[in-house]
Amino acid sequence: MNTPPSPPAAPTLPGLPSGIEESSVFRSLFISYPDSLLLVDQAGRIVLANPAAATLLGYAVDELVGLNVDALVPDSIRPRHAAYREAYGQAPRPRPMGTQMELVAKRKDGSEVMVEIALSPLQSQGLPFVVAAIRDIGAYPRVKQALQRARYSDHLAQLGRLAVDTRDLQVVLEHVPAMAAQALEVEVAMVLLLDSSRLEFRVASGVGLVPGEEIGVRIPSHANTPPGFVFAEGRPVVVPDYGSERRFAVPQAYLDAGLVSALAVPFYDRGRFIGVLTVRSREAKRFGDEELRFLESLSNLLATSLQRVQTEEALNHAQRLESVGQLTGGIAHDFNNLLTVIQGNLQVLEELPAIAQDGYAQQLVGAAARASRRGAELTGKLLAFSRRQMLQPNAVDTHAMLHSLADMLRRTLDQRIGIAIEAAADCPPVLADPGQLESALLNIAINARDAMPEGGTLHFRAQACGALPPEVHNELSDHDAHGSFVAISVADSGTGMTEEVKERAFEPFFTTKEAGRGTGLGLSTVYGFVKQSKGAVAIATRPGAGTTVTLYLPQLYDPAPAAAEEENGDQAIPAGLRVLLVEDDAEVRRVVHTFLMTLGCSVVTAGNAEQALLSMETDADSFDVLLSDIALGPGMRGTRLAAEAQQRFPRLAILLMSGFSSELLDADRDVPQSWELLRKPYTRGELARALARVLAAARP
């Protein structure tokens, strides 16, 4: 068997102490050299290997000796390497370290390592060998940093893909601390979310959690707690050593777990602090700039995921409420037509001589009339929720309104409920319908009363706010959301709501009260009124901790003085007033015809616009007033009929009516000011006043 040749004799070294052989010096240098060294013959066989090479390549030293260097080359590039080695053997030349060539060595276990290789041929010394010095470039600081950044980027990409693929926020929350712990190679990572009250943090997810910080545990947000200190600072916080930390109280559980250093970064939703992502290590001074940048990127991705999920949930909720609103608005329209017939016939019946003299019959008619009015109130609430009610926005002094409302509530609520008001006298006025705003606040106060059966405190507050908070910002269009608002809140100290109840609080007919104690329309009408007023509404609540309902209504700048009420409604209708009545519902048409006849009018009826135009063509000067429903079934609508009629007969007065307030809203924007709009159901007196106003407006 051939034995490897002995290393060449070393040259004489001047100054070498006596007794020390030169060969032993060179062998010691070869063995102790920090880079991996291989002595390779012309056939590519390893003649000598030092311990550093054995460690890097995963072999024992004696396993490397006699091994062909091709065994250290990955299979995919082995043919190319063999050709390179053959060409190099024909013209060997020195190749220094650091040429930036991307080389890969194969370890014994099949794994690969990136290396740089310096080649030093010994042919010039008369020896048929090449010394290969191999260095693991992963040990270079700049390479370590690059590999670390690549690893961080890979984890961020994984989270980005997860955030896109899943709609489940909890899945994202659970993956973030796991990714942070894996990427940073730390023992503890956790996500804490700030409660809506901003008084506590909730541990949302984590790995390696210590006692007292389990999932779901709440931690006060004051500055003496670790997350509270981040909240107070509003920026990333690095803890080099818990043992010397004096800025906040370090929980004993951290020290018992052997935790030494920490890094915590806040994350925000449209500029509003919403949580903290924190990591902890058992090594001192573990976190630097690279770790900080990675954790900030991770927290930004988490915040973006939170925003997207919350936006989608808000959109779905709004779409659901909008669908219900369209349904209830349509129901209210049909119901108003029925109520017009019921109320009209009851009013006519009440005035019949046979009924007028019968006390029992009057009681029955009165009870039916009261029930029909309650039905009208119910449809009004449905229209309020569906944002199809007629509003009359005006300047509202919130300071005066809240004090007036509180005085009324003190006389009517349980005496065990205290009422407090916090509203500055210089609080800007809001632009809203005063009656509807007062009704909305009253609805909220009644709900608050029911949530405090043993008494408590009802707190009204009004204050200017320059912009909407993020949680309600998405409820408005970009144009409406960028104005200035007044926040009017009603807070109670009652039982509070669960998340499930809070989610459905604005849905019509949803109630937690026992049967017979509520319709479930209170908060839904508040929602509809506020949305129609170009505002937003928010609920902050927690079981056992009370509820705060806040209305955000637009501020009014330079309010103009209210126009004086006209007295036209009291003017008498001239006898023989000629009215063309257009109504597609036969029962409603019959009732309105009766009203007009009892008012002394001369009436011609039509079931649609085409019949009405034909009647006008027959006698051009036969009518003083056109009284038409807006919705006339298939064909021409009432608004178009009125426009054509007035174009032909400029002196014709126009009075439109509808049981669908959205039609009245559209007409209010589009029709001339001289036209009058009348909401169904209406009484004969309301019809008479509307006719008087429209006649006055039509006079030159």
Image (tube, grey):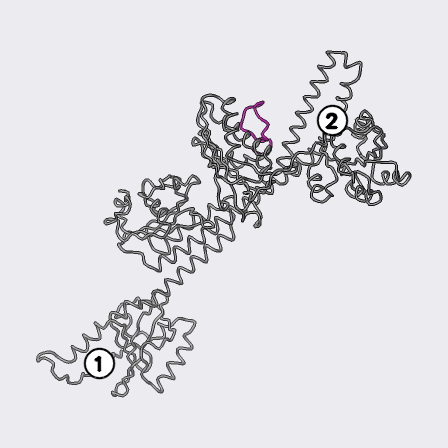
Asked if residue 403 can be seen in this view, the reply is yes
Amino acid beneath label 1: Pro
Q: Position of residue 545 (x, y in %)?
A: 43, 32
Other-residue count near label 1 (Cα within 10 Å), few / some / many at <14 / 14–19 / ≥20 = few
- Write the start and end of the magenta stretch as one range: 508-523
Indicate the quadrant where residue 294 lies: bottom left
Magenta includes 514?
yes
Q: Name the outermost residue toward the left.
A: 18
**For residue 189, side relative to residue 322 (left or right):** left
Residue 559, how many percent across, how many down? 57, 42
The residue at the far front in this view is 700
Which residue does the image show at 42% across and 54% down from the upper left? 298
Please give the residue where the numbered disc 1 appears in the rendered image: 7
Earlier along the polypeptide chain: callout 2 or callout 1? Answer: 1
Task: Give the left or right position of residue 386, taking residue 628 as reference.
Answer: left
Quarter of the rendering occupied by the C terminus: top right
Amino acid type, mark 2: Gly
Is residue 650 shown above or below 15?
above
Q: Which residue is mark 2?
A: 685
Looking at the image, can residue 324 be seen? no
Identify the image quadrant of the N terminus. Answer: bottom left
Q: Is residue 450 above or below residue 9?
A: above
Label 2, secondary structure: give it: helix
Image spot of residue 354 (x, y percent): 80, 13
Question: What main secondary structure does the magenta stretch of the protein show?
Answer: loop
What secondary structure is marked by label 1?
Answer: loop
| Real-space Cα separation, disc 2 to disc 1, in angstroms | 123 Å
Q: Is residue 402 left or right of residue 630?
A: left
Q: Position of residue 224 (x, y in %)?
A: 30, 43
